Structures are given as C-alpha cells and as structure tokens.
Image: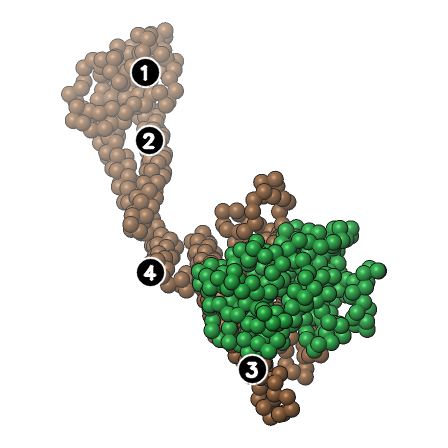
Chain colours: A brown, B green
Amino acid sequence: MTSKISHKLIVGVAGVAIVIIGVFAWVILDSQQRLLLSDLERSANQLSATIKSSTRDDMMLNRPEAVQGIISTIGAQDGIEKVRIFNKEGRIILSTDPEDAGKMVDKKTEACYVCHTADQPLERVPVSERVRIFKTAQGVSTFGIIDPIYNEKGCWQSSCHAHPKSQTVLGVLDITMSMADVERAAREGRARLVTFALIAVFATGLMIYWLVGRVVLQPVRRIAAVTRKVAEGDLSQKVDVRTSDEIGKLGESFNDMMQKLADAQRQLLQANKLASVGRLAAGVAHEINNPLTGVLTYSSFLLKRAGKDSELKDDLDVIVRETKRCREIVKGLLDFSRQSVSERHPVPVNDIVHDACRIVKNPLSTQKTTIVLNLGENLPLIHADASRMQQVLVNLLVNAGDAMPEEKGGTITVTTDLVDDAGLGGASQGPREAVRIRVADTGSGIEKKDLDKIFEPFFSTKGTRGNGLGLAIVWGIIEGHGGRLTVESEVGKGTTFTILVPVARPLTAESRNRPLP
Amino acid sequence: MTGKLRILVVDDEQVILDSARKILGSDLTVLTAPDAEAASQLLAAEAPDIVISDLVLPGASGMKLLDNALEHDPGLVIILTTGFSTVENAVAALKHGAFDFLPKPFTCDELLSSVARARRAVELRLTLGARGPGERGEFHLGVQTWARPERDGTVLLGVTEKELRTLERIEGVELPEIGAELRQGGRLVTLLTSDGLAHGMWSPLGGRVLAVNNALKDAPELLRDASNGARFVARIQPSDLDGELPNLIES
C-alpha cells in the first residue's frame, strides 16, 4: 500500500525526467550537428576557393594535366571523397576518380538541381544553397559543395579561345567529402548524452525514492502505527511530530483529534459514572432514610426525655448530632442525584460571578484570602440556570479558599472572557462562541495523580470536611449546560479551573416552542 | 370516643410506626397501617383526624391515598413524608392538598412541630381544601406560605394567615440571609414558638434573597399583623418565576 505511493511517484518523476532530459539532449545534439555542418561547409568552401585559385593559372594556360595534378593532390587528403570539374553542359572534365572523366552529370541529380530547378541555370547562388548532403550508392553519408567557375577577362582573351565572352559560367567545381567523422562525432555525443540521461533519470529516481521514504513514508508509517494502537483502544498514543510540513501538520491534527477524543471519552465516562452514582444515590437515600428516621426519632425522643441526666444527655446528643450528619450526607447524595439543570435563561455571567463572590466573601476574608475580579466587558449572555451556575462558582471559590495555606491566605483570581470553542455543542455545529470563566488560586495545588480523579464522585482530599461530591456536582452542572470544565494545577503554586459555557443564542420561534432539556 | 384526636400513620417501615406511636402516643390516639389498603380501611372505619403517610407505599402511592382521602373528607389534615425527600416531592404534595411535608429522616421535634400545627388546624376546623380569602395576586404553597409578585419583578414571600393560626405565640424567627439562594420547597424561615417547637416553613419560590423583614427579629408577632405591609418575610429576585408559579395555588 505504502510502497505503491513511492512507486507511483518514482514512475511519475522518472517519466518527467526522461521527457525533460530527452528534449534537452535533442536540442543539444541538434545544435552540435549544426555546428559540425557549418564547420564542414566553411572548410569545404575554403577548400573549393583554394582549388579554384591554385588551378586558375593552369586553367588560363589550358594545362589540364597540371589541374588534374592539383586536384588529385588535394583530393588525396583525408576525408575528401572526390574533386570534380565539369563544364557547362555537365560533362566531367577532370576528376580525382579517373573513371568519371568524360561522363555526363545528370542535371536532375542532387548536385545540380539547386541551380537547375527551373531548367534555367542560375548564375549566382549563395553558399548555403550550394551544399548538399546525400548518401552514395555504398550508403555513405556524403557532403558536397559546388562552386561555379565564372568567365573572366583572361578566359575569353586567352590564346586558346576556348570560351566566348558571352558565357558567364564556364563550369563547376564539385567537391564531395565523407561525413563519417561528423557522424561519428554526433554518434559519440548522442551516446554520451543518452548515458548521462539514463544516469540522471536513475539518480533522480533514487533520490525521489529516498526523499519520499524519509519525508512521506516514514512519518506516514509512524502515524499509521499510532492509528493502529488507537484502534486497539489505547487513546493515550501520540504521534511524534518532527517536522512542520503537511505531514507534521497531519500529525499535529491527529494529536489534537486524539486529545479531543480522549477528552470526550473521559467526559462520557464521567457522565455515565455520575448517572449511575445518581441512580445509586437515589436508591440508597430512600432505603437508608427509613432506618435513619428510626434512629433519629428514637434518639431525639430519648434526648427530650433525658431531662437532667447530663451524662445520658451528652451521649444522646452525640447520637442525634451524628445521625443528623448522616441526614446531610444523604441529602447531599439526593441533591447530587437530581442535579439536572432545570431552567435556563440568558443571563449575564459577570452578575453570577459577583453574586457568588458576595456569598463567599465573609468566610474567605477570615481565611485571609482575597478575590481579584478580572471580568471581561460587554460579554454576551450565557444560556444558564443562574442559581446552578452560582452554586458552581461558590463551590470552586470555597475549594480555592480551602486550598490556601492556613495563616498566610492567598489570592483567588476570577477571570471572564469570550473565546471561540470548536468543541462545544458537538462538532456538527462548528465553532461556537463560549464564555470562559477561570477561577485561579494561589493555593497548595493538586498532585498530578489526583488531577484526573477530582471530578469523580466520592473523591476527596479534604478528609472528613468534604463528602467528595462537590466537584462531581460542579462537573455535572457544567455538563448539563453543554459546557466544559477543565483543571490545571501545579503543586505549591495553585490551581486553575476553567469553565466554558456556550453563549446564549437569540431565541427563535422554533427554539422557544421546544421543551427545555 | 375520647377527646383525644386520632392520627393514622401509614408507612411500610415498622420502626417508623413504632417511633410515631412512642412520640405521639401520649397526646393522640395513634393508628398505624403498613400499606395503602390497610390505610384505606382504617380511614373508612376509624375516620382519623390527621394522617401521616409515606409517599411510596406498597399497593399505591401516598399521593393517590392523599387524593382519595381528601375526596372522601376534604377537611382531613394530611402530612406526607418520604425517604426520597426532594423539593419536587414536597411541592407536589403541598399542591395536592397536603397540610405539610415531612422529609425523612426527621427528628422528634420536627415530627412534633408538624403534628402540633396539624392538631391546631383540626381544632380550628381550618378549611384546607377550599381556598380561604387570600389576597388577590397571591400564590400559595399549600396552606403554608405565599408569594406575591411585585411590579418591579421581585417577589415578596410570607407565611399564610392560616398557617400562622396553627402556631402558638411566635417568640423568634430565623430569617434567610441576604444574598442566599432559596429553592422552591426549601427552607424559607424557621419560626420558634412559645411551646418550645421550631417550625420550618417551605419557600414557595426559588430565587436570590434581596431583603428580609428585619423588624420580625425584634417583634416576631408582627408576622400576624395584617394591617400593614409588614407581614412579609423576605423579598427575592425569582430565578424561575414562570416555571415555578404553576406549582403554586393562585388565590
């Protein structure tokens, strides 16, 4: 599966490399060929001029043997195939190849058609049109150049009177040269280029393979491995994010998703736990209240009748007091079991904070604890049960006060502000605005091992002072508001509780008619 | 038939029946029934003056027993009690016409307080079923307390005239604290009377206490003074007026 990605990439990249390098090679080869040809053309032209000038005198003196000697000497040079001179009619007068002498040249052949296309011989032809490339009968690529020999004063005034004055072109010097060298050079260049191209494609492929493996496949495999572990149920897995590229972002998103999933699972677990504890509490409360009534009525009745027997009175007092304490515990359980959020209305969050602070102000000031309010202005209303929310804040503030070192006291900072929260109200509803309430204390902090448990029912670090339901109730209330409660703490520095509550949306006719949950 | 009033205690727990007999037996004739069926028979045969019944009974619910009994005898004074003592149950019981609600577990004094008021109600032949001449715009929680919404959105809370008539001389009041959150069916005020009893009164509405009638601290009997507006106990900012008013009886 994963190797397929690299295969596809390599095939794709190699294909592109082949095309690019091929075009590149073709362009280079083509220009190299042109260069070689123009070199050949120039040297052929020079050679032709040299032959013409060196044979001029002998021609003037009409010494064909001397001319033959010169062209034979020159024609013996390496690479020169033939040097021929033919007259205007196309008869070969002189040639390095003795067999050619006296033969007629077909004017339709490649050597002639440049000037004779319209059966009308052209007299002046540019160099580029005088050259030709053709294959001999033996299949050898051959380069040819023709050079017309023009009539001049010396020719018609010469004593032999061979040429009349009216004739412009006396004949043609034709040199043919083998292109074997040129072709060999081109072949060699092509071979080098092809070799280079193959090496380049191969190297590119290797590099891509390595890069894909390192940049894509390894991180993807890491993420896949984590995903498998998550699928097996281990939600604590995290992707080791090493880069900031897309794969890194993918890893981060994955971690973020896992964090949210773990949170959601924890919340669900907590909600289930609270619900079952609630049912248990309701059942227990009903069952235990009957025997408690027996104990309480009898003991309080006895206490009433104890009269002046102070020792008996004191003992009965203890029974009544402790039974009343049981009553409060059961009442707490019952309250906990019915912690449904009843009526929710749009309410200003800062008012709730103020009210809660007013309630706890006195007990906190005796603990030398001060509350600092840092409330956001113009916050939207929250959709909340005001008394329940107040209960939440009072509970958190009292806890914060209890966490302060005795004698020294401390500071509780309550902050409210507006935040965007994507996790509230279900992912389907998209990002929502939420009001955030933070209660931060400078108290003793909570140990890491306890931090996960503090919202669980019956977990308490306060010993006999607490029933372990306070934060569970707080959690349930916030949950009932569709909000979220989180905690951060550092031992010795303090604890911060963060509440997120969705802001109230304007009531529509539809939502107004809908029964509240 | 002696001059003693007769009280029927209905509960499936023997210990409750025993303790009721022990505590109330000196002043009242105590009849007991362990279930709804026995209670119905005793109601028909003995015509008790007061009934104390659990809300959850084998056979039928206490609420049903209450409805049947009141239909038969609208003057019957009924005190409902339950181990599942939620405020909703208290409020529902009082709406159904119960004289009082006694959450379990209760102390001897709490039982005596409730029964003392019930006895007084019987002696005074207070009509509990038919509503008495309450003031217009008042909402009552049973016969016990009233709530009067004011124009500014706040609500005055007080103890009904009928309830006050069942009390001996009031010697002290324990008022709620300003800023406290009251719950409907929770404690509003405790009245201490000359017979040594403390009578807790249920709050008709929930909300935040804005003010209390401090004059009552020095002169608790002012509570009975209908001539001026001083009868109120507390002024609250209701938390859910629309939701809670239907639980009350409009006068």
Q: Residue furthest right?
A: B228
Pair 1/3: label in front: 3
Of mark 4 and mark 3, the one earlier in the sequence is: 4
In 3D space, how far apart are the residues under numbered discs 2 and 4 (Cα atoms)? Answer: 73 Å
Of mark 2 and mark 1, the one earlier in the sequence is: 2
Instruction: Provide residue A221's location: percent of width, then percent of height.
Output: 34, 57
Where residue A299 is drawn, which disc sits there?
3
Q: Tell me the kind of residue under disc 3.
A: Ser
Same subunit: marks 1 and 4: yes
Instruction: Provide residue A304's location: percent of width, then percent of height.
Output: 62, 83
Chain of the residue under label 3: A
Q: Residues within 10 Å of mark 4 (few under 14, many from 20)?
A: few
Of mark 3 and mark 2, the one earlier in the sequence is: 2
- Identify the secondary structure beneath mark 2: helix
In 3D space, how far apart are the residues under numbered discs 4 and 3 (Cα atoms)? Answer: 57 Å
Circle 2/circle 4 CB separation < 8 Å? no
In 3D space, how far apart are the residues under numbered discs 2 and 1 (Cα atoms)? Answer: 18 Å
Identify the residue at horizontal 64%, vertical 60% (top origin).
B184
Q: Which residue is mark 1?
A: A114
